[in-house]
Amino acid sequence: MYLLKAVEIFFTTSKSALDTIVAEGRRLANSGRMELDIHQAIEQLDEIVDKADQVG
């Protein structure tokens, strides 16, 4: 239960920063040549999240 509360607090306090990051990521993804690099980076991030879920 403590971990869930800690995650909730993290997202609550980080929401505006995360929104900014997502918006910038979308802007970069839509700027042509960077689109493929961004797509590959997102795939790698998804793999990291999947591995973290397996550990947790």
Image: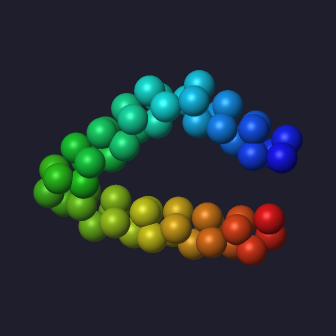
Q: Nearer the viewer, residue 51 or 1?
A: 1
Residue drawn at (33%, 46%) of the image:
25
Residue at (24, 61) in percent of width and height: 35
Relative to 45, 6 lies left or right: right
Answer with the quarter of the image where residue 6 lies: top right
The image shows residue 46 at horizontal and vertical percentages of 52, 68
| Count of numbered labels shown in the rendering | 0
Q: In this view, does 29 lie above or below 45?
A: above
> Position of 49 compared to 33: left or right?
right
Q: In this view, does 20 lie to the left or right of 52?
A: left
Q: Is residue 5 left or right of residue 20?
A: right
Residue 23 vertical placement versus 50 (above, below): above
Q: Residue furthest right?
A: 2
Of 17 and 5, which appears nearest the observer? 5
Residue at 34% from the left image edge and 59% from the top image edge: 38
Which image quadrant: the C terminus?
A: bottom right
Q: Is residue 21 above or below residue 38?
A: above
Give how far across and how far down residue 28 sits, in percent. 25, 47
